[in-house]
Image (cartoon, helix red, strand yellow):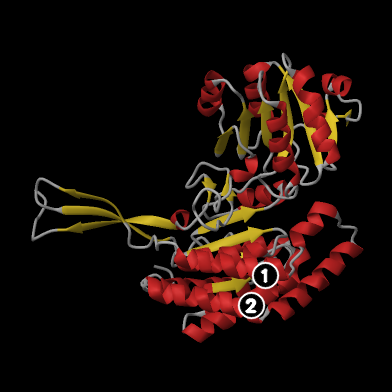
Amino acid sequence: MPSLLPPASYKRDGMSSEAAELETKVRAMGVDARRAARALAPRRREDKDRALEAIAVELERAAPSILAANEADLAAARSRGTRGAMLDRLLLDERRVAAMAASVREIAALPDPVGEVVSRTLRPNGLRVSRVRVPLGVIAMIYESRPNVTVEASALTLKAGNAVILRGGSDAVRSNAALAEAIGCALDTVGLPRAAVQILPFTDRDAVRVLIHQSELVDLAIPRGGEALIRYVTENARVPVVQHYKGVCHLYLDDGADPALAGRIAVNAKMQRPGVCNALECLLVDERDAERLLPPVARALLDAGCELRGDERTRALVPEAKAAASDDYGREFLDAILAVRVVGGVDGAIAHVSEYGSGHTEAILTPSAESAERWRREVDAACVVVNASTRFHDGGELGLGAEIGIATSRLHWRGPMGLESLTTMKWVVEGEGQTRR
């Protein structure tokens, strides 16, 4: 096995001294994280839960400094012209800091997945064979905005016995540093290695590239953010990647749907929090019932402050709707903007989702058991929803507690990444002197 000690320098032919220094520093962080992961892996649940409680307490104690750092990030974002839902994603206030502390305590209350025996068999030769959950090791979490991800990712990886190296967006650099400092202080108080949670102190993409090249130190990379970030990590990584791709989520209103219910679900899915990945981005309506369904649903959305962009049939039924551009379908607006399209029944809706969906969340509102079954069976997404809001595709709402994100790739996980997703398997074989013939 290669040594974990970082070399004095990574400078190679043609590499600048700045690049060499960056590689050396990032690798040193990986070495520290690997050592921390080895120290965490055998710790009992009680030790990890005590650390999580200490983190919750420290977040509450450090709230004034966290909010001051966040206000500096917000001021910088406003000066760059950031507004609306994107500014809301960055915002921390007393309520959100309290919610972060509460989410850490909720994670502490969850069962510890480490050591769970997933299966147990007795072989004919008397061998007892088990599959047991164990930590993954070192996780690189690369994300944009939403500083609460710093806390949730740290708490989840810690509970599952892993170390994490975090790289948040440049717009939240001060907030993330303050949160990481609070977490580090809490780890110090309970005697766990501070290197179990580290913030990459570089905001440029070169640092990300160096981090995801550390195949002997990093076990999994989890990118969470915009399409450009996901693509960059996926194309440059030398470690396994679980993609948290964009959420182009659809709601299809089937023939015979209740218009009042459709309006409530559409407004909730789009407008409760427009800037999150499970927010509705496109409304599809069956052409056979569009004249009855679309006007009242559109009115509910417009009254809630949502801009509508529709095809020709939509605009004929809803004059307030703007003309949809070709790239409005398949677009993640992350704002109070919704694409609308009239389609040819369930077949047309499934075809549209297949072409424009991102594999995140796809919902249908229908009174038809046959349509619902087709949706469940034929739509390919991490989550399909029948007669409810897309906003329920969330770890807490699905009973997993907090989540590290919603994976849209197929390996090694799909959907909300809770504690179980941050473990792998180990085979345990127990015998009484058996030898193989």
Give the residue number, with chain letter if any, for mark 1.
Answer: 97
Give the x, y percent position of residue 184.
58, 79
Between 354 and 399, the one nearer to me in the picture: 399
Give the x, y percent position of residue 407.
56, 47
Q: Is residue 75 visible?
A: yes
Between 95 and 410, the one nearer to me in the picture: 95
Q: Which mark is residue 296?
A: none
Dot 2: element:
helix
Q: How many marks?
A: 2
Q: Quadrant of the N terminus?
A: bottom left
- Earlier-in-chain disc, 1 versus 2: 2
Give the x, y percent position of residue 47.
41, 76
Give the x, y percent position of residue 412.
47, 47
Report the residue at 88% width, 19% height from top: 316
Please report contact status of discs 1 and 2: CB closer than 8 Å, yes or no: yes
Between 278 and 210, the one nearer to me in the picture: 278
Q: Is residue 8 visible?
A: no
* Up-down relation of residue 307 to residue 426 (above or below): above
* Up-down relation of residue 378 to residue 407 (above or below): above
Residue type at numbered disc 1: Val
Residue type at numbered disc 2: Glu
Give the residue number, with chain letter if any, for mark 2.
Answer: 60
Is 205 left or right of 52, judged from the image as shown?
A: right
Inter-mark Cα distance, 1 to 2: 7 Å
Q: Give the residue furthest to the top.
A: 288
Residue 385 occupies quadrant: top right
* Up-down relation of residue 257 to residue 64 (above or below): above
Callout 2: 10 Å neighbours few (<14), some, many (20+)?
some
Is 375 left or right of 345, judged from the image as shown?
A: left
